[in-house]
Image: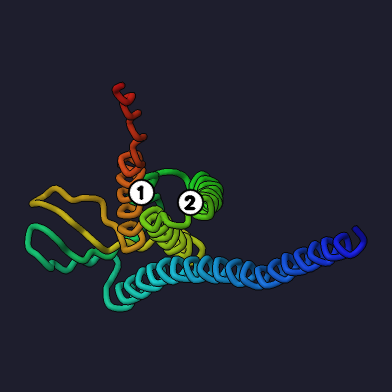
Amino acid sequence: GGPGRRQEVRGLRDLSGGLGKRRDTSDPLRSLQRGGAVMRGAVRYLLLALLAGAIVAIDQVTKLSIVQSMRLNESIPIIPNLFSLTYIRNPGAAFGLLAGSSDAFRMVFFGVTSLFALALLGTILFRLPKKDWMGQLSIAGILGGAVGNLIDRLRYGEVIDFLDVYVDSYHWPAFNVADSAISVGVVFLLIHFAFEKKDLPLLPHASPPASS
């Protein structure tokens, strides 16, 4: 029984050694997979940051162009009875909301709501599923617009608006690129969340019992 016992022990030792080698070879693969996932996540957030940054840049460049080329309250018709470039300064919120409120109220209101909105949007962005590109792009657009208008408030204490849409004597409140990005982002986000449940796979129906 001695030689046979020694062969069994040697075989078990070889088997454990082989399993250890396989574990060793799989560890680098796991590290590569984790590294690839981290890299993909970094690239995704970089693209979203570039989108938000592009919105901020376009918003600020267009506002600067309006300030340098137009007088305050000047209006230049682009499409008669439909669209004009009208340079105004808006101390209120988007589309002129709260423009008639006191300076102290607006300062507190916009300071608190801006910080809360940015924190909330950032939290939603990081909690969205990795494959939810529609939701992430919508949030990035809203963030870009919010930052664009926040820069105006920090620089001027009010927001520069210049896009004037109207029909005859009825004028939609003037807005800017940042307002447009926020509005489009919110609309797409609402549509996305409203139809999200339709994308979920249906539960498979129970198969009928086999007939005898």
Answer few, some or many: residues within 10 Å of disc 2's Cα (few below 14, many 20 plus, some between 14 and 19): few
Q: Is residue 134 above or below residue 211?
A: below
Residue at the far top in the pictured view: 212
Q: In this rendered view, identify the residue nearer to me: 83 or 198.
A: 198
Chosen colour scheme: rainbow
Q: In this rendered view, identify the residue nearer to me: 22 or 194.
A: 22
Q: Is residue 134 above or below residue 52?
A: above
Q: Which x, y percent locates residue 210?
A: 32, 26
Determine the secondary structure under disc 2. loop
Q: Which x, y percent locates residue 118?
A: 52, 54
Q: Residue at image x 34%, y 59%?
A: 181
Quarter of the rendering occupied by the N terminus:
bottom right
Mark drawn on residue 128: 2
Q: Which x, y percent locates residue 81?
A: 7, 58
Q: Residue at image x 28%, y 71%?
A: 71
| Disc 2 residue type (three-letter) | Leu
Q: Is residue 54 above or below residue 184?
A: below
| Disc 1 residue type (three-letter) | Leu
Residue placed under numbered mark 1 in the picture: 189
The answer to whether residue 70 shows anywhere in this view is: yes
For marks 1 and 2, the one nearer the N-term is 2
Distance Cα–Cα, label 1 vs label 2: 12 Å
Number of the front mark, 1 or 2: 2
